[in-house]
């Protein structure tokens, strides 16, 4: 039995069931919860094969979809070490989002659940697609429900924010579509694996000019989605205006779509161009790291602060990818998961804060640690994870990224490290003003987390610690995939060959 | 006259859809005059006529080939477009039933005019001779001029009809002049013979090129290609919504069909001359349509400009000048027809009596009041944007693939950027229906009539079907486009 088919189709089934459910009842919630939890359980079945052989695609789905002269599209999907944890992250966070919605959202929850299910369908498709055309389809399928969630359930300025989000993303993704079409005109197939095989067999060769065009098309879509500075301007508005469950998913998983695309497609399909552009992309990533951190420092609003901190942390992921080192790539993938968990938890907790006080301005808070010690503790764990405290998840990712950056170019590591320091500054300062100090004046006493509120936090906190302490459970799978990928990229390039000694993978794995 | 010149059984079979449509058109008018049938039933008669014509179209395709001494050619290509215009006519009549009731203008005349217009379009798409092109175009146009001004007490309708008529007949003049020149050079109006003559370089090439340009002007007007697009927004805005739906889908598809047939067969030998013309017009059409649509507040006018932009995408397929391009255009026009009619149907529903509510903000809150209709409208909008799993996406995708296969890298990039820009104005509609509180227009909206609901659902299902299972139609399109090398 192929678990991937189940994982992919369950959310779609969930979408239809939720849509058909009666509006004024608890049923939509139960359907959404059951569907997302079952998806999560089914996705556990993907781990076994992927861990056993992270460098190759397992649980492969492959069926013919469109077959006309001059165009053949296969629904080709598979799991390897690169996407298995991302899919698990998605399937884990979705039930949390559903639970969170039920407890904090006031109206029109049914349609929201339907959108969540559709979004999950799109995301899983994006992460597991091995056909460029199918990838593009899921890429857009994930966009539409998110757009509607932001636009229909968001804050006061939701309409302009959602339109900005959509148009920005659309502009990037049509250019990616151009690249996909271009690649098809050269190779006559959309199949990712087949194209890579053609490249390595030398049956199709793209000259540097063609590669650059191809790379820029893909880069446009992914850079907007991550986002990389200076394409980030949609992010603060969208994160701030989106309803909290949507922000939670935007930050935790949707931003990984771009990062995943960069490492899976940009680098592998146009390796020479990617390496040629690596230095300026790394510089953009570092600017993003520092710029995001500086802006986070001055935000008066918790949601916006976490949003800008996301810009900063996502910079690390991009930097890691474009160091073209084993450490950098491993760190980037690890950081994707870690950032998903820590930022997800932060937005979740911010959601509880907002639910209690009706605002997220830092000035409206203060001294709430006394009345809500549980909330304060949970928040501090997520916050320390986000800063990158050792034994918590982000540390591993950021450390490896910095290590990779230091190997590629030492000054990159030095500048990026500045971002780590700044992140401690803005996070702790915000924490201090929100949870400690003078008690803010408020008509209602501030309630602590209830048992219902804690439920989604347990798995997140447990995983943050697990990823921080016991890297070995996740890393070998990732390394197997990234080393495979880096081999692809070094085929026609001499610059990084010296970094790619045959035993480098084993060495890195042992070092951890 | 030799016996072989007389039309035989197969000639009539191949011409059967047109015959049936004409008969039903006349029947509708006679039944109305007889007066013993309810007005709304006349529409049903017309619908039945279209269904029969559709079946006849299939029957005709069982015996493909020329008819009436090469005046018509029934091939896969023509059959495809006949089916498209028939479906367009069917959906438009379905949409108009409740609309005409509401406006108190339910007469058989309307349905008869649609049927006659369809006759013209069917002739156009199967024409193998410039004379037939002209006859088909005129039959179709004259009927649509009247349809545009159908509500004769409505000022906007009158303006629309007058503009359409004056500019349209002017453009037809160009077409006819081009046909005359072609005849002057080659001594023939048959599409195949023109091609052969041009291949053998008969006559001065510059005259042939000018003649082709004149014909391009005439047909370009009908499909609203820049710089001949001016009339489209005014006419679509002024005409009643079901008529606008019809104009933007049926005559447009037919005119494009014959444009492609002409330029891919007759003027094929001059390919290197007109391809740059098409390149420029495609880009200008996309840009003008999309940029102007950004500024519109009236939904019908916005859809008018959007139809210009979509004509630009189809022209990209012409610029590719390959059989893949033709197949892409076929698929595109079919899916465009469905999504545009769907969008106009919802507009005609929300507009209310006298079409008072046709601004974008009048759609505000439709998502609360009529969630199903709103969801279907967003399907049409997403399809117009070109979001995957809708027909609009596959059409656009296939068009740009054809362009890239013909090495039109820059046109593809600019076209793709255009389609991203376009998403902004379609989103305005979605913003209105989902992100605003119900306004006055929506608050007192009755539920849609059954016929209207049927039309909207059929269009939406068609759009989704083409998006999820494009294979069947794409195969048929590329198979029948293979004749255009």
Image: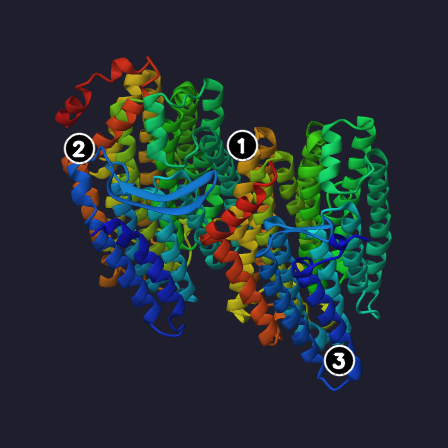
Task: For mark 1, give the secondary structure.
Answer: helix
* Chain that bears disc 1: B
Q: Find the distance from the CA under tag 3 to the CA under tag 2.
A: 80 Å
> Residue at 68% of width from left, 43% of height from top?
B261
**Image quadrant in which you'd find residue B481:** top right
> Residue at 36% of width from left, 34% of height from top?
A192
- Residue placed under numbered mark 3 in the picture: B31
**Sequence-first tag of 1 and 3:** 3
- Residue placed under numbered mark 2 in the picture: A476
Foreground mark, 1 or 2, reads: 1
The answer to whether residue A436 is visible is: no
Instruction: State the mark number for residue B333.
Output: none
Q: Residues within 10 Å of mark 2 (few under 14, many from 20)?
A: many
* Chain that bears disc 2: A
> Residue at 31% of width from left, 43% of height from top?
A77
**Residue B73's x, y, as percent?**
67, 50
Task: For mark 2, give the secondary structure.
Answer: helix
């Amino acid at each position: 039995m192929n678990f991937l088919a189940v994982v992919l189709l369950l959310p779609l089934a969930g979408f239809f069931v939720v849509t058909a459910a009666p509006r004024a009842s608890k049923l939509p919630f139960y359907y959404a919860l059951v569907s997302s939890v079952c998806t999560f359980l089914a996705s556990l079945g993907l781990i076994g094969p992927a861990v056993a052989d992270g460098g190759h695609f397992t649980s492969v789905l492959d069926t013919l979809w469109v077959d006309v002269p001059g165009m053949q599209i296969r629904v080709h999907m598979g799991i390897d070490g690169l996407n298995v944890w991302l899919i698990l992250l998605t399937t884990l966070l979705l039930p949390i989002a559903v639970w969170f919605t039920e407890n904090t959202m006031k109206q029109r929850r049914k349609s929201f659940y339907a959108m969540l299910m559709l979004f999950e369908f799109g995301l899983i498709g994006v992460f597991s697609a091995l056909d460029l055309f199918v990838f593009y389809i899921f890429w857009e399928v994930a966009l539409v429900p998110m757009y509607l969630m932001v636009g229909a359930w968001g804050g006061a300025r939701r309409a302009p924010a959602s339109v900005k989000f959509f148009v920005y993303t659309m502009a990037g993704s049509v250019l990616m579509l151009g690249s996909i079409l271009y690649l098809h005109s050269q190779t006559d197939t959309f199949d990712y694996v087949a194209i890579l095989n053609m490249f390595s067999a030398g049956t199709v060769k793209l000259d540097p000019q063609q590669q650059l065009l191809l790379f820029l098309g893909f880069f446009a879509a992914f850079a907007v989605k991550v986002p990389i500075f200076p394409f980030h301007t949609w992010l603060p508005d969208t994160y701030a205006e989106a309803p909290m469950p949507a922000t939670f998913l935007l930050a935790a998983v949707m931003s990984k779509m771009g990062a995943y695309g960069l490492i899976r497609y940009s680098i592998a399909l146009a390796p020479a161009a990617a390496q040629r552009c690596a230095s300026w992309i790394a510089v953009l990533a570092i600017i993003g790291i520092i710029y995001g951190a500086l802006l986070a420092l001055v935000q008066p609003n918790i949601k916006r602060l976490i949003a800008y901190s996301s810009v900063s942390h996502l910079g690390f992921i991009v930097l890691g990818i474009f160091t073209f080192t084993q450490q950098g790539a491993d760190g980037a993938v690890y950081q994707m998961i870690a950032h998903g968990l820590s930022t997800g938890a932060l937005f979740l907790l911010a959601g509880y804060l907002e639910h209690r006080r009706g605002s997220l301005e830092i000035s409206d808070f203060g001294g709430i640690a006394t009345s809500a010690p549980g909330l304060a503790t949970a928040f501090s764990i997520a916050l320390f994870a986000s800063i990158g405290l050792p034994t918590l998840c982000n540390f591993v990712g950021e450390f490896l990224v910095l290590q990779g950056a230091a190997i590629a170019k030492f000054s990159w590591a030095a500048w990026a490290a500045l971002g780590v320091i700044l992140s401690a500054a803005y996070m702790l300062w915000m924490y201090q003003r929100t949870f400690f100090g003078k008690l803010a004046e408020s008509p209602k006493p501030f309630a602590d987390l209830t048992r219902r509120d804690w439920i989604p936090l347990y798995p997140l906190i447990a995983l943050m610690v697990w990823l921080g302490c016991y890297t070995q459970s996740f890393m070998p799978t990732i390394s197997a995939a990234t080393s495979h990928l880096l081999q692809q990229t070094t085929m026609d390039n001499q610059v990084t060959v010296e970094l790619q000694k045959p035993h480098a993978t084993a060495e890195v794995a042992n070092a951890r | 006259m030799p016996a072989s010149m007389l039309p035989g059984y197969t000639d009539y079979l191949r011409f059967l859809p047109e015959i049936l449509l004409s008969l039903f058109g006349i029947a509708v008018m006679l039944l109305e005059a007889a007066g013993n049938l309810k007005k709304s039933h006349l529409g049903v008669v017309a619908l039945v006529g279209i269904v029969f014509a559709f079946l006849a179209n299939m029957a005709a395709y069982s015996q493909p080939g020329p008819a009436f001494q090469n005046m018509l050619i029934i091939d896969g290509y023509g059959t495809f477009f006949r089916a498209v215009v028939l479906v367009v006519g069917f959906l438009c009549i379905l949409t108009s039933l409740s609309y005409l009731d509401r406006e108190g203008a339910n007469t058989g005349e309307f349905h008869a005019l649609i049927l006659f217009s369809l006759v013209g379009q069917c002739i156009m798409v199967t024409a193998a001779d410039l004379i037939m092109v002209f006859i088909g175009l005129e039959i179709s146009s004259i009927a649509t001029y009247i349809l545009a001004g159908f509500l004769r007490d409505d000022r906007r309708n009158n303006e629309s009809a007058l503009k359409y008529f004056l500019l349209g007949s002017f453009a037809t003049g160009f077409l006819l002049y081009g046909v005359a020149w072609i005849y002057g050079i080659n001594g023939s109006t048959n599409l195949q013979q023109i091609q052969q003559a041009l291949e053998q370089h008969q006559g001065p090439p510059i005259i042939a090129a000018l003649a082709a340009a004149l014909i391009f002007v005439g047909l370009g007007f009908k499909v609203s290609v820049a710089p001949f697009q001016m009339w489209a927004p005014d006419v679509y805005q002024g005409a009643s919504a079901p008529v606008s739906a019809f104009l933007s889908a049926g005559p447009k598809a037919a005119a494009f069909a014959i444009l492609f047939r002409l330029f891919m067969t007759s003027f094929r030998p001059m390919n290197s001359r007109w391809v740059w013309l098409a390149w420029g017009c495609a880009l200008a059409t996309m840009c003008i349509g999309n940029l102007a649509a950004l500024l519109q507040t009236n939904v019908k006018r916005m859809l008018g400009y959007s139809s210009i932009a979509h004509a630009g995408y189809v022209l990209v397929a012409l610029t590719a000048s390959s059989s893949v391009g033709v197949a892409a255009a076929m698929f595109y026009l079919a899916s465009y027809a469905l999504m545009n009619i769907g969008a106009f149907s919802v507009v005609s529903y929300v507009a209310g009596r006298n079409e008072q509510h046709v601004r974008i903000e009048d759609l505000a809150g439709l998502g609360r009041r009529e969630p199903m209709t709103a969801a279907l409208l967003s399907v049409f909008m997403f399809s117009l944007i070109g979001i995957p799993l809708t027909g609009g996406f596959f059409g656009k995708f296939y068009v740009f693939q054809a362009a890239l296969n013909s090495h039109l890298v820059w046109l593809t990039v600019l076209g793709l950027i255009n389609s991203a820009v376009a998403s902004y104005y379609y989103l305005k509609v979605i913003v209105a229906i989902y992100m605003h509180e119900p306004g006055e227009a929506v608050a007192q909206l009755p539920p849609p009539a059954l016929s209207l609901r049927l039309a909207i659902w059929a269009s939406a299902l068609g759009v989704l079907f083409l998006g999820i299972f494009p294979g069947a139609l794409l195969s048929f399109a590329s198979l029948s486009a293979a004749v255009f090398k």
